[in-house]
Amino acid sequence: MERATTVALCDDHEIYRRELMTALERDVEIQVVAEADIPSQLGPVINDHPPKIVVVDLTPIQGDPLEIISTLRDLMPISAVLAVGGPNDELAPALLAGANGAVDKNVAIRLGPKIVKTLVRGHLFVDQRAAQSLLRTINSHPRRSSIPARQVDLVDRLSSVESIADITGDALAEAAMERELFALLVSLRGVRANSSSGSLS
């Protein structure tokens, strides 16, 4: 039987890639089809058959998260991107750059198949560290007072649980929560884009 979900791993630590691959492939519906140290190396490997998920490391040696995610979007526009980071990495920038999920590296190993299946269904996946990073971004936002309280409350709730999966209830509640989170990210992305061009609109 052909495995349903293909994954590419991009991390310059081979041992971590192997651990994550092992964790993911414990689920028979997941198959790691490509590995690379940096995003640009993935292109030649998966041009003909883009994976459904690309997992990318956000350590500083890899570069700016915006550039990393943009590169992956150019290489694989139909793939979902999961950003993973070590203990000193900020995860919010990956979400602001368009990643579909952001988690601590250890969480990726522990919850790998669950995260992959969530992303394949078109949902966002955020863990506690990513939410805490996002909360810091909100609090330092130049227009903090203009961000709807319900969105701030949602991120605050996420920052106190292991992952977004821990506060999802019924389908309607989950959809409403995702809409709020997505709206927040779009708003923050707009400010980041304007900031990089020298103005805030």
Image (cartoon, rainbow, N blue to C red):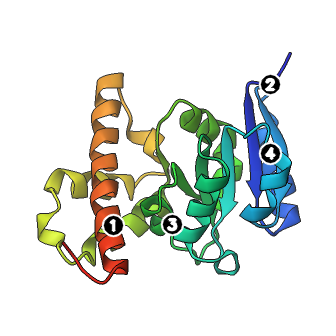
Q: Which residue is mark 4?
A: 46
The answer for how far apart the CA atoms under marks 3 and 2 are is 30 Å
Identify whether 1 is placed above or below 28. above
Q: Which residue is mark 1?
A: 135
Mark 3 is surrounded, within 10 Å at the Cα level, by few (under 14), some (14 to 19) or many (20 or more) other residues, namely many
Query: Of the numbered discs in the image, which one, if any, rests on residue 124?
Result: none
The three-letter amino acid code for the residue at tag 1 is Leu
Q: Which residue is mark 3?
A: 91
Q: Which residue is mark 2?
A: 3
Residues at marks 1 and 2 touching, judged by CB atoms closer than 8 Å: no
The answer for how far apart the CA atoms under marks 4 and 2 are is 16 Å
Sooner in the amino-acid sequence: mark 1 or mark 2: 2
The three-letter amino acid code for the residue at tag 4 is Ile
Residue visible at 86% across and 15% down in the picture: 1
Residue visible at 59% across and 53% down in the picture: 73
The answer for how far apart the CA atoms under marks 1 and 2 are is 37 Å
The three-letter amino acid code for the residue at tag 2 is Arg
The answer for how far apart the CA atoms under marks 1 and 4 are is 35 Å
Q: Is residue 22 visible?
A: no
Sooner in the amino-acid sequence: mark 1 or mark 3: 3
Q: Nearer the viewer, mark 3 or mark 4?
A: 4
Q: Position of residue 145 (x, y in %)?
A: 12, 69
Sooner in the amino-acid sequence: mark 3 or mark 2: 2
Q: Nearer the viewer, mark 3 or mark 2?
A: 2
Q: Nearer the viewer, mark 1 or mark 2?
A: 2
Q: Nearer the viewer, mark 1 or mark 4?
A: 4
Mark 2 is surrounded, within 10 Å at the Cα level, by few (under 14), some (14 to 19) or many (20 or more) other residues, namely few
Q: Is residue 30 visible?
A: yes
Element marked by disc 3? loop
Q: Position of residue 95 (x, y in %)?
A: 46, 59
Q: Residue furthest left?
A: 145
